[in-house]
Image: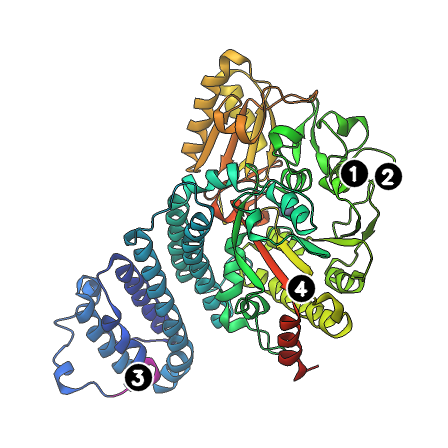
């Protein structure tokens, strides 16, 4: 057995051994007992006892150490580390007790926990009752909770080691890649379990319920269903906050996942704290639109209809000449896509004062039809810039009126940040910390300065348009798709991309079947898991486009919706510039959104005042 000659050699050796153990833990051929003594040795090296001295170089030639059983390997490693400690004590002290000890004792528990989640997902059988909304919500929560735990284990690890999986390259690249692949496996497993349930929610328990809920809360007559029955009907004020991009998985990930990141000023995670009270309910889940993106989802929230009826099936659609963004056009260009404008449920509310606090930053011409007019009608809007002041504005806007009051707040920052830095990363959790802080501030402000709202007649309703998916690789570009069709079918379809869904237009009717096969082959070669539909498929006819759809714009002939890893890009960008978060696909992270209700009662006010009195 040769001695470790230099620091570099020692680090290299320790690293190789770590990779070997990670591999074995993953295969199930090593357990904690097979490596824990190595970790102990890093921190407190001790003379190897006489029994271990028996192992010498004849038994352990260097080249063969990876053939040893996991337990033998542990003895071998300790022996080599001991001789290194004995001959180069200063170097050993530099490398082992701080650096390697921290790395090993952080990484291995994380891997063990991920393996446990992975096994649970594979072995536990949970059944979903047919056509039962509360039970189906529980079913969704069960799997998303496991997934959220996996994502948070990875963030906690990154925080502990001070690294970041996408934005910074580190010496722990292999370890991070390995852990990430475990998380991705858990992601595939959860998505597999929820495949049918996703569509069920999108069909019957979807975003169109929100307008009904708000109407009911404000005392309007609605046809009761399994969702509306969870809400009361005698409210004077409703504060509806739409948090763009906050999927249910991300919500769970933040609510109880990232324990090491609690904010110390107030010492709590507000969602976790609120969940102990009856006034708070975060157990309900909704399904986003088939293409879970802002345009089609918000159109469904405010019109109370599915894209099949309102016409906005995605943010980017084809007008017959170009791919256009529905949120950026107005006048006749906008009218081409929709049946009615405005099409908002707001105009059906009686005796209600409506205040719109819009953090979207987009303001369109008032006299022309546009996306904004479609969703908000003619009601006055206040633009909220900077956007993180939304919650301050909400507490200031609550008034005691003779009319009922509906405040609509739109908060875009969770989505914005997540796009560039990744949906379940340490940096995204910082964006949630900000949300946590300003949300607490709003509650304290209301409790102290607007005590009348805690009269049991005010409900805060929080939901999202869609969730976010995390993307680490696998892009397909518009150019590549066109090239495939030119080469294999001598046609060039029009292609429109919505990040994780891709629409193909202008395919001759008799070529659609062949085109679907060509597209399927292409994504198979790229190892992209996605669903490809034609416009006549039942799902498309139910959730996306109706054949009698109003509008003078063409419908897509093929619709590709990415479920696992993957992103569509309009320009062939380099890998370094890939967006690490996105939506528009069919993962459970994107499809399920929370439906949170907070009833402001005098009891809740007392709790808030008591809890926060010690600091403010
Ligand atoms: Zn959005
Ligand atoms: Zn977005």
Task: Please name the residue shown 62% across and 77% down the image.
Answer: 266
- Sequence-first disc among 2 and 3: 3
**Pointer 4 and pointer 1: residues touching (CB < 8 Å)?**
no
For mark 2, does the 10 Å Cα neighbourhood hold few (<14), some (14 to 19), or many (20 or more) residues? few
Task: Please name the residue shown 64% across and 43% down the image.
Answer: 212
Image-based side of 74 in relation to 277, left or right: left
Disc on res. 85 = 3
Label 2 – label 4 distance at C-alpha = 37 Å
Q: How is the image coloured?
A: rainbow
Image-based side of 509 in relation to 455, left or right: left
Q: Nearer the viewer, mark 1 or mark 3?
A: 1
Label 2 – label 3 distance at C-alpha = 76 Å
Quarter of the figure with residue 46: bottom left
- Reading the image, the residue beneath label 2 is 366
Residue closer to the observer: 488 or 582: 582
Label 4 – label 1 distance at C-alpha = 32 Å
Residue interval drawn in magenta: 41-46
Residue closer to the observer: 352 or 523: 352
Q: Judge whether residue 467 can be spotted in this image.
A: no
Q: Secondary structure at mark 4?
A: loop
Q: Secondary structure at mark 2?
A: loop
- Reading the image, the residue beneath label 1 is 373
Label 3 – label 4 distance at C-alpha = 68 Å
- Reading the image, the residue beneath label 4 is 456
Q: Position of residue 585 (x, y in %)?
A: 52, 40
Q: Judge whether residue 367 can be spotted in this image.
A: yes
**Pointer 2 and pointer 1: residues touching (CB < 8 Å)?**
yes
- Sequence-first disc among 3 and 4: 3
- Sequence-first disc among 2 and 4: 2
Q: Is residue 268 above or below residue 587?
A: below
- Sequence-first disc among 4 and 1: 1
């Amino acid at each position: 057995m040769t001695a470790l000659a230099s620091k570099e050699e020692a680090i290299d050796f320790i690293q190789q051994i770590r990779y070997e153990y990670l591999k074995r833990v993953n295969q199930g051929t090593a357990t904690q007992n097979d490596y824990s003594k190595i970790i102990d040795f890093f921190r407190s090296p001790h003379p190897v006892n006489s029994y271990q001295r028996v192992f010498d170089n004849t038994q352990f030639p260097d080249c063969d150490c990876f053939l040893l059983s996991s337990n033998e390997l542990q003895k071998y490693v300790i022996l080599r580390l001991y001789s290194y400690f004995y001959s180069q004590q200063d170097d050993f002290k530099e490398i082992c007790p701080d650096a390697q000890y921290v790395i090993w004792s952080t990484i291995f528990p994380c891997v063990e926990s991920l393996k446990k989640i992975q096994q649970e997902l594979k072995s536990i059988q949970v059944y979903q009752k047919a056509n039962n909304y509360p039970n189906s919500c529980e079913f969704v929560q069960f799997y998303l909770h496991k997934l959220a735990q996996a994502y948070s284990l990875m963030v906690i690890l990154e925080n502990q080691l001070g690294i970041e999986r996408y934005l910074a390259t580190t010496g722990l690249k292999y370890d991070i890649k390995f852990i990430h692949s475990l998380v991705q496996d858990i992601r595939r497993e959860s998505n597999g379990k929820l495949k049918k349930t996703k569509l069920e929610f999108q069909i019957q328990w979807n975003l169109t319920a929100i307008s009904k809920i708000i109407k009911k809360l404000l005392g309007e007559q609605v046809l009761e269903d399994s969702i509306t029955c969870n809400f009361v009907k005698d409210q004077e004020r409703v504060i509806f906050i739409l948090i763009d991009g906050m999927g249910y998985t991300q919500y769970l990930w933040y609510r109880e996942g990232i324990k090491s990141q609690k904010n110390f000023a107030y010492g709590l995670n507000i969602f976790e704290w609120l969940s102990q009270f009856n006034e708070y309910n975060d157990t309900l889940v909704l399904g986003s639109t088939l293409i879970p993106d802002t345009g089609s989802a918000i159109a469904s929230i405010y019109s109370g209809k599915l894209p099949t009826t309102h016409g906005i099936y995605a943010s980017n659609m084809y007008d017959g000449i170009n791919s256009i963004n529905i949120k950026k056009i107005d006048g006749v260009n906008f009218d081409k896509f929709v049946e009615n404008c405005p099409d908002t449920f707001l105009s059906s509310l009686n005796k209600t004062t409506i205040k719109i606090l819009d953090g979207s930053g987009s303001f369109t011409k008032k006299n022309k039809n546009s996306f904004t007019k479609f969703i908000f009608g003619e009601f006055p809007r206040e633009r909220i810039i900077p956007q993180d002041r939304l919650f301050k504005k909400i507490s200031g806007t609550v008034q005691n009126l003779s009319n009922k009051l509906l405040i609509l707040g739109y908060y875009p920052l969770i989505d914005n940040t997540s796009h560039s830095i990744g949906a379940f990363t340490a940096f995204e959790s910082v964006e949630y910390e900000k949300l946590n802080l300003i949300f607490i501030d709003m509650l304290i402000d209301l409790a102290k300065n607007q005590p009348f709202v805690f009269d049991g007649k005010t409900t805060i309703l929080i939901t999202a348009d869609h969730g976010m998916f995390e993307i680490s690789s696998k892009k397909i570009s518009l150019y590549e798709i066109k090239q495939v069709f030119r080469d294999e079918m001598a046609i060039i379809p029009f292609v429109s991309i919505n990040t994780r869904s891709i629409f193909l237009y202008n395919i001759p009717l008799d070529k659609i079947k062949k085109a679907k096969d060509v597209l399927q082959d292409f994504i198979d070669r790229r190892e992209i898991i996605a669903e490809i539909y034609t416009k006549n498929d039942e799902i498309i006819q139910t959730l996306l486009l109706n054949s009698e759809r109003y509008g003078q714009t063409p419908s897509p002939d093929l619709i590709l919706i990415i479920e696992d890893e993957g992103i569509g890009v309009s320009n062939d960008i380099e890998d370094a510039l890939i967006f690490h978060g996105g939506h528009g696909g069919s993962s459970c992270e994107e499809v399920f959104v929370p439906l949170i209700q907070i009833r402001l009662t005098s009891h809740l006010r007392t709790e808030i005042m008591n809890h926060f009195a010690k600091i403010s």
